[in-house]
Image (cartoon, rainbow, N blue to C red):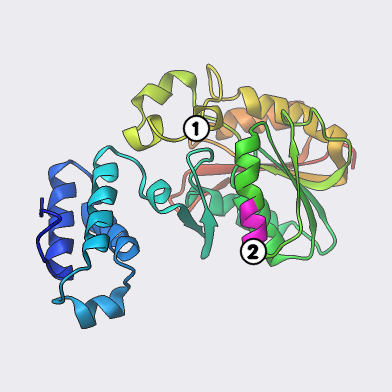
């Protein structure tokens, strides 16, 4: 690795970053090396092309090496940079919340298809608030997000402020402190089976909050609780939409139907995998 005291160009530094991450077994080494360089050296593609051969400020050089060391320990890039992107929007993230993923875009898109102006939306296990805030950015609606973690709710509030939206947050174990009814309930709850978590990539296993991952012995513990509890908090004809694991579609659909939901369905993501389960309140 390049010594901090050496005067190196942006191009050389980027190459060093790529080689360092590749040598450390980081799968997306080139992409990650660029993202870290972009942040550490306050640059972008255009500036890089114009100044690639110029020496890097020692302060930026030190910052880049610090970022690389963190990434070599499999700390996700999103936590290093403090931001993640979802549906073209940037969200503040910390290790207190799950990193927003492309999988969740399917849930948001399906919710938008069923949302009308003036709707009231409840987002359970809100984490960073990315689901609720994405919905409120696209439609005229009221929203409340709940989470058992006060630290997660602080992240959600920071995102709300940055996006200039109105939303409420409630520290609650699912419906524990929810007293109102809503036209739609959405959730990306923990749905990974406990025994699978030790097999996950180190980026997830060692850095993301286990409380937001662990869905119990079969991965369905939180999903069952939500499906059973939601009707009491849904208006007549209200929708429940849940992000699920790729192999949970049939079981979750059966749970929805056994609880009397109507218009039940499982929606696939862009990869053709089961990703969202939907059902309408039984009180229609």
Q: Quadrant of the C terminus?
A: top right
| Residue 87 seen | no
**Residue at 78% from the left image edge and 36% from the top image edge:** 261
What residue is pinned by disc 1? 209
Q: Which contiguous range is marked in magenta?
A: 158-162
Horizontally, is 122 left or right of 19 in the view? Answer: right
The image position of residue 196, as x and y in percent, is 41, 23
Q: Residue furthest bottom?
A: 50
> Mark number for residue 163?
2
> Mark number for residue 100?
none
The image position of residue 91, as x and y in percent, is 54, 56
Q: Secondary structure at mark 2?
A: helix
**Residue at 89% from the left image edge and 40% from the top image edge:** 180
Q: From mark 1 to mark 2, how far is it between C-alphas?
A: 24 Å
**Residue at 16% from the left image edge and 76% from the top image edge:** 54
Is 204 inside the magenta-drawn segment? no
Tell me: residue 106, above or below residue 41: above
| Residue 49 seen | yes
Q: Nearer the viewer, residue 146 or 272?
A: 146
Q: Nearer the viewer, residue 281 or 229?
A: 229
């Amino acid at each position: 690795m390049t010594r901090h005291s050496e005067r190196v160009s942006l191009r050389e530094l980027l190459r060093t970053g790529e080689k360092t991450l590749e040598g450390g077994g980081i799968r997306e080494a080139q992409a990650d090396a660029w993202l870290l360089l972009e942040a550490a050296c306050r640059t972008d593609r255009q500036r890089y092309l114009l100044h690639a051969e110029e020496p890097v400020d020692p302060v930026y050089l030190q910052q880049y090496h610090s970022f690389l060391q963190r990434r070599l320990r499999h700390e996700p890039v999103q936590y290093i940079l403090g931001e993640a992107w979802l549906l073209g929007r940037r969200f503040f993230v910390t290790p207190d919340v799950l990193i927003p993923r492309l999988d969740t875009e399917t849930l948001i898109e399906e919710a938008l298809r069923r949302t009308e102006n003036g709707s009231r939306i409840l987002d359970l296990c809100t984490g960073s608030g990315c689901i609720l805030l994405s919905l409120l950015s696209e439609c005229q609606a009221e929203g409340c997000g709940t989470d058992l973690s006060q630290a997660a709710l602080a992240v959600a509030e920071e995102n709300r402020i940055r996006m200039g939206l109105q939303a409420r947050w409630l520290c609650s174990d699912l419906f524990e402190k929810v007293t109102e009814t809503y036209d739609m309930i959405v959730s990306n709850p923990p749905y990974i089976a406990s025994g699978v978590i030790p097999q996950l990539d180190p980026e997830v296993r060692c850095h993301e909050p286990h409380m937001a991952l662990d869905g119990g012995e079969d991965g369905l513990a939180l999903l069952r609780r939500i499906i059973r509890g939601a009707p009491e908090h849904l208006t007549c004809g209200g929708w429940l939409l849940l992000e699920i694991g790729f192999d949970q579609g049939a079981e979750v659909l059966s749970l929805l139907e056994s609880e009397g939901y109507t218009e039940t369905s499982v929606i696939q993501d862009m990869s053709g995998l089961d990703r969202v389960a939907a059902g309408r309140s039984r009180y229609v």
